[in-house]
Amino acid sequence: MNTTAAPSLSWSQDLALGHAVLDQTHQEFIDLLGQAEAADDASLIVRLQALFEHTVEHFAMEDDWMKASAFGPQHCHGTQHQVVIQTLQELLRRAREEGDLELTREILPELGKWFAQHAQTMDAMLTWHLDQVGFDPLTGQMSRAPTASGEAAACGPASCSS
Ligand SMILES: [Fe+2]
Ligand SMILES: [Fe+2]
């Protein structure tokens, strides 16, 4: 099959977190996801690779911020990132080694749904925390010490299941 699809996700103010660096990164993610969804068979792997590379950097940036700012729920947030990275790696492997593009075409819209929920929950919690501690993403410094209440934003089963 050599069909293309309309993007499953578009940028909107519902996804804006009010954090300039992360909002820019999220818009880039949505653009790359849309390009992969719209790709024909000849260009799908290249588009998927571009999405993968951007996502590795995007998630590593958030993981670094979580560590540097003593963000409480970093464990399950980071675990969600790892699952998505592993999924994209497997899609690339299947596409390259087995010529399976259909699985990628099935999963990409699901990735769009996952991303919208992730941004509005996990990433929203992270940006709230970064604002609370006055975290500067350029220097990695905090202008206020993390409070017990900030770290107590526990990562319970409910927040880890999404
Ligand atoms: Fe993110
Ligand atoms: Fe995230």
Image (tube, grey):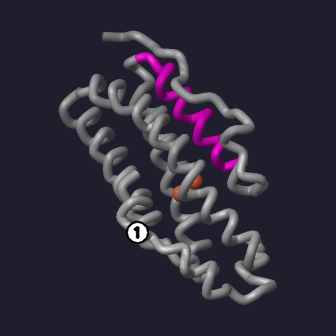
Q: Mark 1 packing: few (<14 Cα in 10 Å), some, or many (20+)?
A: few
| Residue 68 appears anywhere in the view | no
Residue at image coords 34%, 55%: 83
Pick whichever, 90 or 9, lies toward us. Answer: 9
Residue 115, relative to residue 8: is it above or below?
Answer: below
| Rendering quarter of residue 11 | top right
Q: Would you say the magenta stretch is mainly helix, strand or loop?
A: helix
| Rendering quarter of residue 144 | bottom right
Residue at image coords 57%, 35%: 32
Amino acid type of the residue that numbered disc 1 sits on in the rendered structure: Gly
- Residue 98 percent across, percent down from the top left: 18, 32
| Residue 145 appears anywhere in the view | yes
- Residue 142 percent across, percent down from the top left: 75, 83
User: Which quadrant would the N terminus be assigned to in this image?
Assistant: top left
Q: In the image as oriented, which residue stretches furthest toward the left?
A: 98
Specify whether residue 141 is painted magenta.
Answer: no
Q: Which residue is mark 1?
A: 156
The reply, left or right, for residue 23 in relation to residue 117 is: right
Which segment did they paint magenta? 24-40
- Residue 104 percent across, percent down from the top left: 33, 30
Specify whether residue 33 is painted magenta.
Answer: yes
Residue at image coords 40%, 20%: 42
Kindly tell me whether mark 1's CB lies below 8 Å from ligand 2: no
